Image: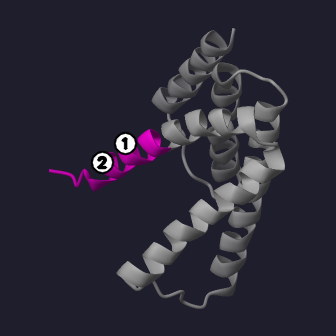
Amino acid sequence: MSNLNWLGSSLMAAGFWGLWGFLSKVATLRLPAAAVYLISVVGYLAVTGYLAAMWGVAIPYHPGGLAAALGAGICLGLGLLYFFKAMAEGAAANVVVPLTALYPLVTVILSCTLLGEGFSLRQTAGVALALVAVWLLST
């Protein structure tokens, strides 16, 4: 039997990201996008502090890993900023969230082309259905 720990973690991530999208819209109805971003960073740092204090997370030295993690953080920050900007500019959450949920397509394309990861016919069908779902949710 395969280990399904990833399933529980994936569902928790989806739940928290779902709440994040909703709370982002509520916040941008009341605050400017830049303020929402800065306050969100405080929340992010609180989780970071918890991880460091409770789990004793140590950061090993690996130049490629550190550079990739730093780049991921920069991309996360810029993506969040533009997400909040789209919400603050009056777009409905039911349009912005599904549209920005297409980000895995970028990951899939880069992983297949640059990392040589495979992509099955079933996964291709899943991507196509995800695109249809995003279109249906945003129209």
Element class at badge 2: helix
Write down the residue under mark 2: 8
Which residue is at a point 62% across and 43% down the rendered structure image? 108
Furthest toward the front, the residue is 30
Q: Residue at x 54, y 46 (%)?
A: 118
Spatial CA span between label 1 and label 2:
5 Å
State the mark number for residue 32. Answer: none
Q: Which mark is residue 11?
A: 1
Quarter-wise, where is residue 68 in the image? bottom right
Q: Which amino acid, by three-letter code, is at mark 1? A: Leu
**Majority secondary structure in the magenta region:** helix
Vertical arrangement, residue 58 with respect to residue 29, above or below: below
Residue 76 location (% of width, % of height): 70, 56
- Viewer-proximal residue, 83 or 111? 83
User: Which range of residues does the magenta coloring cover?
Assistant: 1-16
Q: Nearer the viewer, residue 52 or 14?
A: 52
Would residue 99 appear left or right of 2 to someone viewing this image?
Answer: right
In the image, residue 70 lies in the stretch drawn in magenta: no
95 left or right of 122? Answer: right
The amino acid on which the numbered mark 2 sits, given as a three-letter code, is Gly
Residue 50 spot, x, y in % from top left: 45, 74
Question: Hey, which quadrant is residue 100 in on the image?
Answer: top right
Check the image and name the residue furthest to the bottom: 61
Query: Badges 1 and 2: C-beta atoms under 8 Å apart?
Result: yes
Q: Residue at x 64, y 20 (%)?
A: 94
Vertical comparison of 62 with 132: above or below: below
Residue 41 is at least partly visible in this image = yes
